[in-house]
Amino acid sequence: MPKSLTKVVYKPDTQSTDEFTVIVNPAEYKKWKEGGKTIPLSEVVDSFKVFYSNQGAQGILGTPSKQQLDTVFDTTKDVDVVTQILEKGKDQPSNGFTSGMGATNVARGSFTIDSKGKGLTGI
């Protein structure tokens, strides 16, 4: 059975629709957030992939450019960006994310996640 995952969403500005998202293991993230900073980030996050949406909570999650990461987080290093999102972001439990639902052939996909629930057919 695939483990359930949670997304942690960081909005740099309350008035903006820009959101940066990281997919995490909810149990490990809770321990990490409560002060267990000794837990390796590789156990907390599902991957070091940062997703970006400029449509708020609804819409397709793509990948941010290095310029966007540098502007918002003052770095393009994935570990530093993920750490900032985990520290400043809010977790949003989702029953739509499971680790067994990943792309089976990454070379064929575009690394987008549709959080609207329609799949990629609505593009």
Image (cartoon, rainbow, N blue to C red):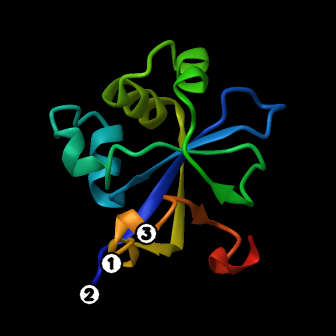
Q: Residues within 10 Å of mark 1 (few under 14, many from 20)?
A: few
Residue that extends furthest to the bottom in the rendered view of this protein: 1
- Looking at numbered disc 1 in the image, what kind of residue is underneath it? Gly
Which residue is found at the position 36% from the left and 30% from the top? 78
- Looking at numbered disc 2 in the image, what kind of residue is underneath it? Met
Percent position (x, y) of residue 19? 66, 41
Query: Quick one: SS at disc 2?
Result: loop
Q: In which quarter of the image is the N terminus?
A: bottom left
Pointer 1 residue: 100
Query: Quick one: SS at disc 3?
Result: helix
Q: Is residue 105 above or below residue 45?
A: below
Q: Are marks 1 and 3 in contact (CB under 8 Å)?
A: no
Residue 98, by quadrant, is: bottom left
Left or right: 61, with 81 as reference point: right
Left or right: 41, with 52 as reference point: left
For discs 2 and 1, the disc positioned in front in the rendered view = 1
Percent position (x, y) of residue 88? 52, 30
Percent position (x, y) of residue 18? 72, 37
In front: 32, or 76? Answer: 76
Left or right: 7, with 61 as reference point: left
Q: Is residue 83 above or below residue 29?
A: above
In front: 72, or 8? Answer: 72
Q: How far apart are marks 2 and 1 (CA)?
A: 8 Å
Q: How far apart are marks 2 and 3 (CA)?
A: 25 Å
Pointer 2 residue: 1
Q: Which of marks 1 and 3 is nearer the N terminus?
A: 1
Q: Do the residues labelled 2 and 1 touch (CB within 8 Å)?
A: yes
Q: Is residue 26 above or below residue 120?
A: above
Pointer 3 residue: 108
Q: How far apart are marks 1 and 3 (CA)?
A: 17 Å
- Looking at numbered disc 3 in the image, what kind of residue is underneath it? Arg
In front: 120, or 11? Answer: 120
